[in-house]
Image: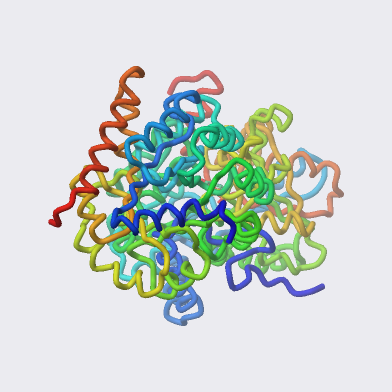
Amino acid sequence: MSTLQNRIQATFDRLKATQRKALIPFITAGDPTLDMTVPLMHALVEAGADVIELGVPFSDPMADGPTIQRASERALKNGMTLRGVLAMVAAFRQQDAVTPVVLMGYGNPIEALGWETFAARCAAVGVDGVLTVDFPPEESHVAFEYLQRYDIAPIFLIAPTTTEARIAQVARLARGYVYYVSLKGVTGSGNLDVDSIAAKMPQLRQFLNLPIGVGFGIRDAETARQVAQVSDAVVIGSRIVQEIESSAPDRLLDNVQNFVAGVRAALDRKERL
Amino acid sequence: MQSYNQPDATGHFGPYGGIYMAETLIPAVEELRQQYERFRDDPDFKAEFAHELKHYVGRPSPIYHAKRLSDSLGGAQIYLKREDLNHTGAHKINNAIGQALLAKRMGKRRVIAETGAGMHGVATATVAARFGMECIVYMGADDIQRQAPNVFRMKLLGATVVPVESGSRTLKDACNEAIRDWVTHVESTFYIFGTAAGPHPYPMMVRDFQCVIGNEAKVQMPEMIGRQPDAVSACVGGGSNAIGLFHPYIEVEGVKIIGVEAGGYGLATGKHAAPLTGDAKVGVLHGNKVYLMQDENGQIIETHSISAGLDYPGVGPEHCLLKDMGRAEYVAATDEEALAAFDALCRFEGIIPALESSHALAHAIKIAPEMGRDKVLLVNLSGRGDKDMNTVARIKGITL
Ligand SMILES: Cc1ncc(COP(=O)(O)O)c(C=O)c1O
């Protein structure tokens, strides 16, 4: 494996050595403006993010709740495109060569660009992983071939409804980390249940040799801390996008940074619950 | 000719179809596939389906020779497969009953649906009432406006109609919202999908339920005219009424197959809903890979059609394959042509067609004069036009 892809692995290795858990914030590229995305990415890192999930907006975000739907609509209205997102990652990499960036979105914009071109561009600009929500392993042969060729980690979702046979299938294909969707629902839904997540982990670990991130429904630092105690990483999306949506432009970076720093502090607090 | 047997075991029609869904729903579509495979050849299931179609829907639907219309055109004889005479007024009920019977066997008491014209929503609300199920129908806010009578029908039948304000506020957005509901209530809920598209097994299952149209026609036409028609034709939104008529004819030599898409303001304007005729790029939406109207960045573009039921950027995967194979021909009829056909059927035959079906009629009216009087064109009259009174009145400048 080349050193490039290992940004994700290096990050998780480093965290493991210091017994810390990964904090993975999600933002939608191009929201609230095209100019804000790269500064937001740097602000997230400064506040303690370990990996950045950068959402590629799509016109029909079927797996997303209202908050991320609105973010996608704003971004598209701003003229955000997949090529534009890749250019943003290139700009981010001029100042940050270590923080892994994972693109998250739906398959059609990638299909339109072509998987080969896309994977090559990802490698060139410094994207480390790709999560395509509506491409399950069954439909990912072409995607997988090109991502592998260019050493980009395919990140897959596992849900509470995923069967053991499918977990095993994901285990064969996935690299980087695996994203466990903590509830049945769209992004931004409430009522996440930490106990049921904890109960699911042994089964996942039995098949998966990769770090396990948990997301969907994490809305505050304390819940993040509880989830982190049973997993390797927490992913926070809608709550951060909501902060972006509700902040005045001049307060935006500070507000997002304060929220993320609060989660970071909760994750790093020494005493156990 | 190699025998036609689609889709393959993984739900692909050549390069099209598949199961492009988020992980949370994959086990649900897999369960559906298994249950459907289990019941599709089950004698009890087939008997109950046939019984419902006969006694509740009123099948078989007749075929009618539109003689005055044909005479006025001076060419081919136009015959109509009268799906408009079905209970609830369109072909949609065939599929809704099939899926409701499956839901019943799977122990699901809550059904959801998306709807554009409202015919599938009405059909789903109807079968939900018939079988005592809770029913939620998602409908684009714009479509709620243009198909108001159907919204009231659904409510009378006890369904909850949820307006969808996101995106283009039409059928595709209603689909998105229904999928979001399904992912949230995946264990209790059966998604009664309204057309022959979506993730496997829907394109196959909806086709199978709708094939009653073509299977009946194959028996009825020889009874009426001593042979099969020279061509069969239907409008294509997602493609369910069309594939129901076409599929039984795929291996019948000498029968031309013509699908008619919504040409909107004209293909050249870009404001249409004709992914097959307009040579849209192949893409992925709502669980399947199909010809899909999109911009150069892979974002789905807003479509336009006068008929809500055809106003959709994609099309079912089997039609994509039939186009590539050259077995079916796909053409488009504009809003204007559909309206002229609507008027013609009213005046010549005393039948008020749905605006969707009027597209298929429009093409028949276009090509009939170029064909000999001994030729026979079978057009699927997929639904009746009662729901379109407001739309047509508005266009004619009349307030009801
Ligand atoms: C009467 C009628 N015909 C046709 C359609 C188009 O659907 P499909 O292409 O699945 O037959 C609709 C959809 O609402 C309809 O109501």
Closer to us: A132 or B133: A132
- Please state, as top left, top right, bottom left or bottom right, where the N terminus of chain A lies in the image: bottom right
Using residue B378 as the reference point, say whether residue B100 is left or right of it.
Answer: left
Residue B58 x/y as whole percent: 47, 61
Residue B336 x/y as whole percent: 66, 29
Using residue A166 as the reference point, say whether residue B223 is left or right of it.
Answer: right
Using residue A77 as the reference point, say whether residue A182 is left or right of it.
Answer: left
When asked about the image quadrant of residue B189, the answer is bottom left
Closer to us: B361 or B351: B361
> Which residue does the image show at 72% across and 55% down from the upper left?
B232
Indicate whether B155 appears above or below A20. above
Residue B233 x/y as whole percent: 70, 52
Q: Hey, which residue is sitting farthest bottom in the picture?
A: B43
> Which residue does the image show at 66% across and 31% down from the upper left?
B340
> Which residue does the image show at 56% across and 67% down from the upper left?
B208
When asked about the image quadrant of residue A253, the answer is top left
Indicate whether A218 appears above or below A182. above
Residue B195 x/y as whole percent: 53, 54
* Residue A102, visible in the rendered structure: yes
Closer to us: B94 or A78: A78
